[in-house]
Image (cartoon, coloured by chain):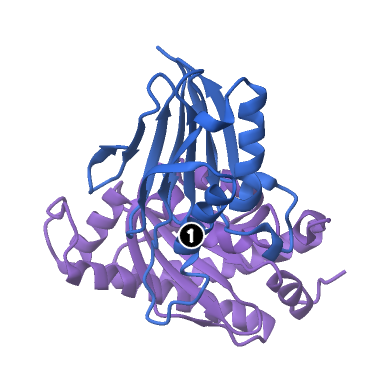
Chain colours: A blue, B purple
């Protein structure tokens, strides 16, 4: 059995082949999978919020899209990944509850996904695939043997990006 | 920066637990009257948890649950969440609709309305007692329902708290019925700024 590395909410982990990195029950959060197909070094971040500059408390960089992704990328480069080869896949950013007067708070999933894409663009990382939005939760798993990103839902089945 | 909730005194935590106790007691009584069954409840727990650990309270981030979510409006805003294992939600609607136990395996829109109404009644009963203690006018929003993974449902509330800190103050009570079928967790999660307002209002602000 390959090692299964678990990532909690507002955290990220990196690893290398043959491990898998998994994060359970993403709702409005976004799971960002980065992968270098040659060294098979990868990382998975489970971010909660779009932007650290708009938060009162920004002590944990893994909580925000704009701080978690660069930090995880740095760790991967230190572990031997090569920047120009690293690509990204993302999933999550759901709106779990629908209220009639949806405020910005309720739309945090959408804002998370938007921010993640901006950060990836800024860092020059290619976004290969995404499965974002909707109103359901996702469990995501990055397989470091192949870079496959498996997404499980309760009622919408399973898919691989 | 030091988070306010990490510095609560024993006295303050006790006061919050007592509020939870009376609030949840009211809610349990209301639920018991609706389903005409005896409801037991645990003594409320007041926990200060790292955000990522909150889903563990209800069996982990991938546990299948039904969640009724309400925002609390007023001078001390926050979130109320009533979480049940999926099977409990099915049992509960069977009871409410007068069907045979075990009949329901997925929710129709009538069942969903019934669960939201339950959430509404529980939240109303809970907030009534909280308002009584604090003399603050606290009102619940219209409820919203989701049937999904616990982590996904909680992420909505936790991300709001996450803008202010890395810990959540969770006042949590577990309900059980006399038979196995129905159990649930009732959560009151004050917005970060609300806690000092509640504590001042009940006179235990340091």
User: In the image, what residue occupies the spot 44% across and 48% down?
Assistant: A26
Q: Residues within 10 Å of mark 1 (few under 14, many from 20)?
A: some
- Residue B28's x, y, as percent? 44, 66
Above or below — where is A85 with respect to B201? Answer: above
Taking the image as shown, residue A135 lies to the left or right of residue A82, namely: left
The chain letter for the residue carrying disc 1 is A
Residue B156 left/right relative to B19: left
Quadrant position of residue B197: bottom right
**Residue B61 seen:** no
Q: Nearer the viewer, residue B5 or B88?
A: B5
Percent x, y for residue B25?
51, 67
Q: At 65% across and 62% down in the image, what residue appears?
A: B163
Given the current orientation, which residue lies at the most extreme right position?
B206
Q: Quadrant of residue A45?
A: top right
Residue visible at 30% across and 52% down?
B88
Is residue B87 visible in the rendered structure shown here? yes
- As rendered, which of A63 and B94 lies closer to the eye? A63
Q: Residue B181 appears at what percent x and percent y?
A: 28, 50
**Outermost residue, top direction?**
A1
What residue does disc 1 label?
A114
Along the viewing direction, whichever of A134 and A125 lies nearer the viewer: A125
The correct choice, above or below, for B103 with respect to A4 in the image is below
């Amino acid at each position: 059995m390959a090692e299964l590395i678990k990532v909690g909410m507002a955290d990220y982990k990196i690893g290398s082949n043959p491990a898998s990195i998994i994060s359970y029950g993403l709702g409005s959060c976004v799971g960002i999978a980065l992968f270098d197909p040659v060294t098979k070094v990868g990382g998975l971040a489970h971010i909660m919020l779009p932007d650290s500059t708009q938060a009162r408390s920004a002590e944990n960089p893994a909580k925000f899209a704009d701080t978690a992704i660069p930090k995880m990328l740095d760790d991967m480069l230190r572990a031997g990944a090569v920047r120009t080869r690293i690509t990204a896949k993302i999933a999550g950013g759901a709106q779990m509850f629908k209220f009639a007067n949806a405020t910005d708070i309720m739309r945090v999933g959408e804002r998370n996904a938007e921010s993640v894409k901006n950060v990836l663009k800024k860092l020059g990382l290619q976004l290969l695939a995404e499965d974002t939005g909707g109103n359901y939760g996702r469990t995501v798993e990055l397989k470091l043997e192949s870079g496959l990103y498996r997404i499980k839902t309760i009622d919408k089945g399973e898919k691989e990006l | 920066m030091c988070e306010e909730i990490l510095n609560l005194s024993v006295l303050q935590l006790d006061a919050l637990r007592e509020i939870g106790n009376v609030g949840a007691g009211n809610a349990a009584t209301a639920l018991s009257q609706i389903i005409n069954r005896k409801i037991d409840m645990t003594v409320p727990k007041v926990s200060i948890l790292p955000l990522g650990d909150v889903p563990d309270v209800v069996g982990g981030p991938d546990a299948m649950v039904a969640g009724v979510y309400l925002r609390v409006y007023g001078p001390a805003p926050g979130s109320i969440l009533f979480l049940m294992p999926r099977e409990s939600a099915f049992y509960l609607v069977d009871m409410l609709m007068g069907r045979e136990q075990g009949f329901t395996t997925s929710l129709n829109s009538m069942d969903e309305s019934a669960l939201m109404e339950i959430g509404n009644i529980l939240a109303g009963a809970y907030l009534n007692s909280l308002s009584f203690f604090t003399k603050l006018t606290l009102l619940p929003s219209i409820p919203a329902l989701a049937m999904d993974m616990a982590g996904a449902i909680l992420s909505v509330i936790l991300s709001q708290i996450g803008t202010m800190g890395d810990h959540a103050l969770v006042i949590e009570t577990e309900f059980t019925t006399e038979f196995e079928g129905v159990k649930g967790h009732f959560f009151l999660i004050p917005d970060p700024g609300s806690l000092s307002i509640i504590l001042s209002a009940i006179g235990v602000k340091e």
